[in-house]
Amino acid sequence: MNQSLLPVSPLCAAIGVQTPYDLVEAAGTKVAISRHGAGQPILCLHATAHGGRDFESLSNALVPLGFEMVCVDWPGHGRSPPDASGQPASAKRYAAVLEDLIPILFGKAKPIVIGNSIGGAAALIASLSMPEAMRALVLCNPGGLAPLDRLATTVIHLLVKFFEAGSRGARWFPWAFGLYYRLVLSGKPAHTQRARIVAAGQEMASILVEAWRSFGQADADLSGKVANLSLPVLFAWAKSDQIVAWSRSKRAVETMPQAKVEFFKGSHAAFLEDPSAFQDALLAFLGALPDSPLRPDVELT
């Protein structure tokens, strides 16, 4: 059966983009896309086992300010069918999807790209190959910037084993995954979406295995490449992250010529865990861009 015709799990759909949405073909597969508002486009890219609904509150806040909010469900996430190409989940694979999507969705317009975790790593990879297609990056605890050393490979190995148990249907996994996600999304404002993610954890375990395996591959290390990035970048770092830690990514960020760093409450996704502070920092960053996309009447708080 064509994978694009397979029914989407209700638990996964609850995490992803909400109606109305479209399925758009890119890089040999189909992904679910939601679009709300009009104006300067902001393209939102989520973490592994998350979905476009991560950005629901942010969209509600920014659409009235004159932005078009465009959210993606990566292949096999949310309302997107499994990847028809058969390729496993990785930042490199998602970057290929992103590189196809941007001209399809925006033509010659340049979106501001917000990427979290694997979504941030995919945005970095795509921006290095096609910087002319984007206006700026907002990266929330992105992968790929910490050194791929013994500590990293050990953590990756342990998490792959953990998610493999989930993919085999281990009875203890849903309980353990719930505990794990209290560390991943510790901020109280993320409670509702965290509960949705935890509910779908066993269904997403096989994709988590693929993604975490990919993090241990040599081409996942972007730390030596990002000094060449010419775009303005806001790093919005949730400062309690124990896995994608600022202390291990700091050196790579400091090589980037137009990087600005802000810190927020939470453990992995500032826009979910510290939404008001994130929105203020985002608007200040966008307001400082050349030819600012903000309307003149927008007041920053």
Image: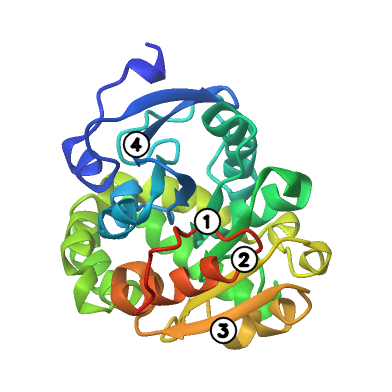
What's the coloring here?
rainbow
Q: Find out whether the residues at labels 1 and 3 contact each other: C-beta distance under 8 Å.
A: no
Marks 4, 3: nearer the viewer: 4
- Residue at 49 percent across and 47 percent down: it is 40
Return the residue at label 4: 34
Of callouts 1 and 4, the N-terminal one:
4
The dot on residue 293 is 1
Amino acid carrying label 3: it is Trp
What is the crowding at mark 1: few (fewer than 14 residues within 10 Å), some, or many (at least 20)?
some
What is the crowding at mark 2: few (fewer than 14 residues within 10 Å), some, or many (at least 20)?
few
Q: Is residue 212 visible?
A: no
Of callouts 1 and 3, the N-terminal one:
3
Lateral position of residue 214 relative to residue 51, left or right: right
Question: Gap between marks 3 and 2, in whole Å?
Answer: 25 Å
Q: Find out whether the residues at labels 2 and 1 contact each other: C-beta distance under 8 Å.
A: yes
Snapshot quadrant of residue 142: bottom right
Q: Secondary structure at mark 2?
A: loop
Question: Gap between marks 4 and 3, in whole Å?
Answer: 31 Å
Snapshot quadrant of residue 139: bottom right
Lateral position of residue 254 relative to residue 293, left or right: right
The dot on residue 246 is 3
